[in-house]
Image: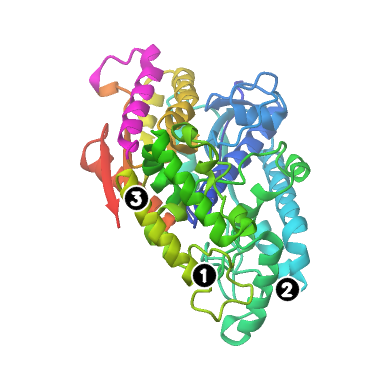
Amino acid sequence: MADPILHVSIGPVQQFVGQARRTRDLWAGSFLLSWLAGQLMAGVMRRGGRVLFPLVGTVQAPRNPLLAAIVGGQSEQPSTGTLPNRFKASVPAAFDPEDAAEDARQAWQRLAESVWGQFVAGAAIAGRGTRAIWERQIDGFWELQWMMGAEPGDGSDGSWLDQRKNWRSHWPPCEGGDHCTAMGDWQEISGFVRGRERHLQDAFWRNLQDKVGRLDIRDGERLCAVALVKRLFPKLGTRSQKHAIGWPLDAANWPSTAYMAAVPWLMHVGATAARCSKLGRYLREIEQHVGPDAFARLKGERATRLPGLDSLGEHAGLDGNLFLEAALANPRATPLRHLRGTGTEHLEDPDADTRERLLGSLKRLGGAVGGSAMPFYALLLMDGDRLGNLLRENDEQSVSAALARFVDRVDDTVAGRNGVTVYAGGDDVLAILPVTCAVDCAIRLRHAYDLAFQPLKLDAASRRATASAAIVFAHYHCPLGDVLKCAHTELDETAKEGNGRNSLALAVML
């Protein structure tokens, strides 16, 4: 008798990934979801199972870099999610999916406890029932679904998980109190009700801000346990990351939307030594006005490495808000010498004089180098067309191998257009790019998708492997979750349904 077939999925995807307030949150949600899927895959493989789709290799010879890091098969330390949240495997007859699910739950608990211990535990004494709220949310968030049965032989097992979702067996815990400002279905962890205990709630979050820094929890943010894990796990120390994730991540700093908006202007400035020198004078003026300590805090992009900015050297590391006039003019978005929440809240803008002088300098710099930075960036979302049909009409392993070849090309393709890959797994890509590079990147990714499927020789037009994409050109201050939602809408309703697939949809958000 043939081994049973197992289909597994982990979610919720939109609630975990899509509810993001900053680019690092978006990356963190994508990475963690992919990492947990890898924990499930590894659990299946260690118990004698074989992952059939996607193509990831074996425990002894893992092909996917993320899975390789999870099982310890390679020294590579990936920081990009490259595994989808659902997969198909062949498993022994006595296999119990709950065993692999428990592996993923323990990995999540280990990560959450590391974040709690390093960042939250010390502040929890100022809360009301904070630990109980934390445990309830961490224990009750993930929804693991699986279906196992005999291989039908006609590809109909591809719909098993969709049918399984109609059977609601996961009920998230009831959430009371004030809700999280990032993930609105969940209670913020202070336990206080703002309507009558505002001062206690504010004191709790100021206490936590003091421990993690006001760039990681901004004024007005009140988060649930799950949002805090997403926000803070990249800031765990190296030893804690090795314990919780399995390897240290180089992902504490991600380019902000403001910084990505400024990239085309920075590339223009860095194209000549004369313009680069003018930028250097502006940076020295900032340091002179705000002082060396505050200037060091403003180097929030020092870990961002985009090839188009190599000529700028250390000049490329300054916070993107300092290159955009509208952002620099906003005291809440761009504190200079003072940080909000340090006894200066009663002042309308404690840095008003410094800000006015620097705004004048930035405007003069724009005039000297041929223009000012524009406040728009691009979010690119790409997805294969009719993948289910491809799997039913072709050898599953061949399709999986083609998708693996495509994923192998994604990161270099995006980085070559001065973008950053948020996620690349299966037939899906999510990336953030400068506006001047996004369309070209989409075209190159589409070409890479074609090349990946060429060995399958899908000659008939009706059976071609095609992909569709959506690009949203968004103002840097648009809520990131709304931008992602717009991209999904344009991809599904315009590029796929409206244009019949094999299409690129463009949208602008002001």
Packing grade of label 1 (10 A; few <14, some 14-19, many >=20) is: some
- Residue 398 image point, x, y percent: 45, 17
Are the residues flagged by discs 2 and 3 in contact, CB closer than 8 Å? no
Closer to the camera in the image, 321 or 65: 321
Pointer 1 residue: 351
Are there few (<14), some (14-19), or many (20+) residues within 10 Å of tag 3?
some
Label 2 belongs to which residue? 129
Query: Left or right of 213: which side holds 434?
Result: left
> Does 264 appear above or below 486?
above
Q: Which stretch did the figure color magenta?
A: 436-461
Quick check: can you spot residue 49?
A: yes
Label 3 close to label 1 by CB (< 8 Å): no
- Name the image quarter holding residue 481: bottom left
Query: The C terminus lies in which quarter of the figure?
Result: bottom left
In-image side of 199 versus 383 (left or right):
right
Q: Which residue is mark 3?
A: 366
Q: Earlier in the sequence, mark 2 or mark 3?
A: 2
Q: Amino acid at mark 3?
A: Gly
Query: Gap in Å between the C-alphas at discs 1 and 2?
Result: 38 Å
Q: Residue at x 35, y 56 (%)?
A: 363
Q: Judging from the image, what secondary structure is the residue with disc 3 in?
A: helix
Closest to the observer, 144 or 281 = 281
Is residue 441 covered in magenta? yes
